[in-house]
Image (cartoon, rainbow, N blue to C red):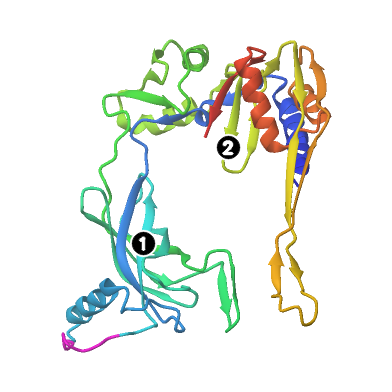
Amino acid sequence: MARRLVLAAFWVLVACAAGLSGARAERVRDLVQVDGVRENQLIGYGLVAGLAGTGDQTTQVPYSVQAIRNMMRQLGVTLDPNAFIQPTAVAAVMVTADLPAFMDVGQKIDVTVSALGNAKSLRGGVLLMTELRGADGQVYAVAQGSLLVAGYEASGQGGSTTVNIPTVAHVPRGASIERIPAASFAPDGAVRLQLDHRSFGNSARIADAINARMGPIATSTTPGEVVVRGPVVAGARVRFIADLLDVDVTPENPNAEVVIEAQSGTVVLGQDVKIGPAAVAYGNLSVTVNETPEVSQPAPFSRGRTQQVPRTQVQASEKTAKIIEMRNAPRVSDIVRNLNAIGATSSDLIALLQALHQAGALHARIKVI
């Protein structure tokens, strides 16, 4: 399985290398964000009702009962504080949403609902009216609606099965905006472009491309920001920014990096990763220990006792080390092909790349995420 992963990564890297072999122009909108145009995160605590016995076990989740009492009190129903309540059709949930910039009151946004207690599934539930607040504590939206759940759980006396995540649901257009945050762009006529990836070269190239097309109006102030002088009239700024973001830019080649995702063993090699002359020896020592206990049965009328006698077999084997000479590899595919030639798995690939980097043969930065 691991070898198949390495081979699959090989073809992905070959395709990436082919696509990145030639520099191509990109639009400014794909490289920057306009300062002031941003989303705001919203969050709220609510209840999901109508579950088919898969809600919270309120004896273990006391805040569900408290939320039910508070909600019923607001609706004019007073519950006995000493009464035992265990509604398995209700679950406490957290509701989250992203509020895009320049939305108006009354427009709809999507929300995500996540179980907070020990509910088994939210399938078939209905989110009751929930206030969504921003980081300033103000209510910006109100969510309510039927849930869409992609996962499910089925169980019996002897086992259970779960597909996807049944405790996370979505409500498309489930929240109505009640308040809009203050948002402004280019308040003084200056449009500030924030680069997605800070780079001296890209900052300078974006400014040069804008000046070549729209006149000397852009200045690269930092590796992460380009300031553009916009029109003084506020009504002309929308069209100006639309034209500004459509300017074509040829970005600089990315840094030579090897990105390693440690948990899954995924390795991604950038375009300009190269390996200098090096020799790699790859071998493996395996030790196998087998425990096969035997029963010792005494002869009849010998007054002996039946005993269990341990039998341990230890076997050690060491594979012959494979040595491969790695010459200068001008392409990503050459690197992976050389490593696959010595039978490297995904975990071996990570170790070999780190060793080559320590030896000075890998001409790239290693980034572990």
Where is residue 244 shown, x and y percent of the image?
A: 47, 25
Q: Amino acid at mark 1?
A: Val
Tell which tag, 2 or 1, sits nearer the viewer. 2
Residue that numbered label 1 is attached to: 95
Foreground of the two, 111 or 178: 111
Q: Amino acid at mark 2?
A: Glu
Q: What type of secondary structure mainly makes up the magenta span? A: loop
Where is residue 121 shown, x and y percent of the image?
A: 48, 73
Foreground of the two, 226 or 340: 340
Which residue occupies 58% across, 37% down?
261
Name which quarter of the figure residue 368 lies in: top right
Pointers 2 and 1 in contact (C-beta within 8 Å): no
Where is residue 18 shown, x and y percent of the image?
A: 76, 26
In this picture, is 298 found above or below 109?
Answer: below
Label 2 crowd bin: few (<14), some (14–19), many (20+), radius 10 Å: some
Which residue occupies 32% across, 75% down?
60
Q: Tag 2, which secondary structure?
A: strand
Q: Which mark is residue 237?
A: none
Name which quarter of the figure residue 138 lies in: bottom left
| Apparent side of residue 291 relative to residue 263 in the rendered image (left or right) | right
Name which quarter of the figure residue 268 lies in: top right
| Apparent side of residue 106 relative to residue 18 in the rendered image (left or right) | left
Label 1 crowd bin: few (<14), some (14–19), many (20+), radius 10 Å: many
Which residue occupies 52% across, 15% down?
209
Q: Which mark is residue 261?
A: 2
Magenta-highlighted residues: 78-85
Q: Tag 1, which secondary structure?
A: strand
| Apparent side of residue 125 relative to residue 290 in the rendered image (left or right) | left
Work out whether mark 2 precedes mark 1 in sequence or the reverse, and give the earlier one: 1
Which residue occupies 31% across, 79% down?
59
